[in-house]
């Protein structure tokens, strides 16, 4: 018995010695200090390229994601993301557009406000971040939120300070869905111009919006453009056919040239208010006296005749798939076109190849809306007064805490905190600083003193509102 005890004691001492030696050896090894080395040391992260920018390090990277976060056997795919690195001692903003990620350095408004780092993620199924083969049933808001969660968990040991999620339009929706499914990840959310189509079949809010937006004369002038374009369908469709042929465009997804033509015409009013302002009303032509070419050119300038060509639609198949399976899509009545339309506002199904099956899940948006109303915490929603997408908004209810909805007067789909009225702008800025843990003492005492911590950079902070396909947030 004593021999056994002595043997056990010796073994314990030996194990302790080996463990101590191993720990000492590990501690003696130099730890990565360069941010590039730290990022590439993360399992699943690989470098695509690094681009220099004064005051920052900017990396375009891949991250290995599960195709199905609930089932590892479904395989993996590479998802692009970028890191605009300033300092690991600063807070970080997690930004997404909900579409492709830009591979050029850019700074979101919250990133400038808090003077922090920025991580930007490409949404799953937007090429090249698409599994092969693509199982479209794995494209939903919960899987996408899990993508963000996985990247956040991988980066948090490096960027240990507070994190905010942000995005505009579909990116604002994405930030909101991420918060719904992973409410403990972020310290705050800033969602810009995020539509909230709770009941897909009930879109009267959009009809009411178009009855009142802007000056009456402008509304009527835009309606006349759409009306005349359908009255003169035959000669203008000839121009459209010539346009498609000259650019080697096809319209197989929509089905016919007539359907693609009408869809483009009916987006004119929406497209104007999404990206233009009241000052642009003066440029709306007198549709009754305008030539066919003038009408054609104006619709192209506001809308883009290429929008419903296969070559344009293919890049946005993931969006239209989601619109037709979870997000919903607006349908407006357009009474000024009574008797002239053949198809009405066409559903997302018309813009997705027929070999991709789609089934709408009405519970998805109801779930998110209910969650925001009762559980929103440290969430800020910003909308533009003249933006059609703001007709149906997120509205935190009685169960919400430290959450706000602000509307920027006169602004369109590019609405931001800077465009709010003075007191709301100051309060929103102060809350963003507080959520990020970097509010100066003066701001903590008086929110009216709040302002962005980083100076404006004309190149980095340039607001380039891409004129995207109409009826797409």
Image (cartoon, rainbow, N blue to C red):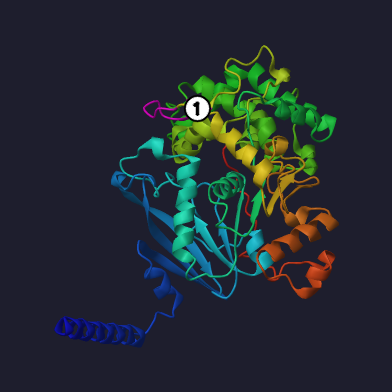
Q: In this orientation, does residue 225 appear? A: yes
Q: Residue furthest front?
A: 1
Magenta segment's dominant SS is loop
Q: Is residue 444 above or below residue 199?
A: below
**Measuring 44% from the left and 45% from the top, which residue is drawn there?**
126
Q: Is residue 365 above or below residue 31?
A: above
The x, y position of residue 170, in whole percent, is 58, 44
The x, y position of residue 263, in whole percent, is 58, 26
Q: In this orientation, does residue 470 appear? A: no
Quadrant of the image for the N terminus?
A: bottom left
Number of numbered discs visible in the structure rendering? 1
**Element assignment for label 1:** loop
| 473 on left or right of 218 | left
User: Magenta segment: does it hold 354?
Assistant: yes
Q: Is residue 122 above or below residue 447?
A: above
**Measuring 44% from the left and 56% from the top, which residue is drawn there?**
150
**Measuring 48% from the left and 31% from the top, which residue is drawn there?**
244
**Measuring 58% from the left and 42% from the top, which residue is drawn there?**
468
Q: Which residues are magenta?
A: 348-358
Which residue position is annotated with label 1? 360
The x, y position of residue 89, in whole percent, is 57, 76
| 264 on left or right of 40 | right
Front one among 128 and 137? 137
Front one among 344 and 183? 183
| 393 on left or right of 55 | right
């Amino acid at each position: 018995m004593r021999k056994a005890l002595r043997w056990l004691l010796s073994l314990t001492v030996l194990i302790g010695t080996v463990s101590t030696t191993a720990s000492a050896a590990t501690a003696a090894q130099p730890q990565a200090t360069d941010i590039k080395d730290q990022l590439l040391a993360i399992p699943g992260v690989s470098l695509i390229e690094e681009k220099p920018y004064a005051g920052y390090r900017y990396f375009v990277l891949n991250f290995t994601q599960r195709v199905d976060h609930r089932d590892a056997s479904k395989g993996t795919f590479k998802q692009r993301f970028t890191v605009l690195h300033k300092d690991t001692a600063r807070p970080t903003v997690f930004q997404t557009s909900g579409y492709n990620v830009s591979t050029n350095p850019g700074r979101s408004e919250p990133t400038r406000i808090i003077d922090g780092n920025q991580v930007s993620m490409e949404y799953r199924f937007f090429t090249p971040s698409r599994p092969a083969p693509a199982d479209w049933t794995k494209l939903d808001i919960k899987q996408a939120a899990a993508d963000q969660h996985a990247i956040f968990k991988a980066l948090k040991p490096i960027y240990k300070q507070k994190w905010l999620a942000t995005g505009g339009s579909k990116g604002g929706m994405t930030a909101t869905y991420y918060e719904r499914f992973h409410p403990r990840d972020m310290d705050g959310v800033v969602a810009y111009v995020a539509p909230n189509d709770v009941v897909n079949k009930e879109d009267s809010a959009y009809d009411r919006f178009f009855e009142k937006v802007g000056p009456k004369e402008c509304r009527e002038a835009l309606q006349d453009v759409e009306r005349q374009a359908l009255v003169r369908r035959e000669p203008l469709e000839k121009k459209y056919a010539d346009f498609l042929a000259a650019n080697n465009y096809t319209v197989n997804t929509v089905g016919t040239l007539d359907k693609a033509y009408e869809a483009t015409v009916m987006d004119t009013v929406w497209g104007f208010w999404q990206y233009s302002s009241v000052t642009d009303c003066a440029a709306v032509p007198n549709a009754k006296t305008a030539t066919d070419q003038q009408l054609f050119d104006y619709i192209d300038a506001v809308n883009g005749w290429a929008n419903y060509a296969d070559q344009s639609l293919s890049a946005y198949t993931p969006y239209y798939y989601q619109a037709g399976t979870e997000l919903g899509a607006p349908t407006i009545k357009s009474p000024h076109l009574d008797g002239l339309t053949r198809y009405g506002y066409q559903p997302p199904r018309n813009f997705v190849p027929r070999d991709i099956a789609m089934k709408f899940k009405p519970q998805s948006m109801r779930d998110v809306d209910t969650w925001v109303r009762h559980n929103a915490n440290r969430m800020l929603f910003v909308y533009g007064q003249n933006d059609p997408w703001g007709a149906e908004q997120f509205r935190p209810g009685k169960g919400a805490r430290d959450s706000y909805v602000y509307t920027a007067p006169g602004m369109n789909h590019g609405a931001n905190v800077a465009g709010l009225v003075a007191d709301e702008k100051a309060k929103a800025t102060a809350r963003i600083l507080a959520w990020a843990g970097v509010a100066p003492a003066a701001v903590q005492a008086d929110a009216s003193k709040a302002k962005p911590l980083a100076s404006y950079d004309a190149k980095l902070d340039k607001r380039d509102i891409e004129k995207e396909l109409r009826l797409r947030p």
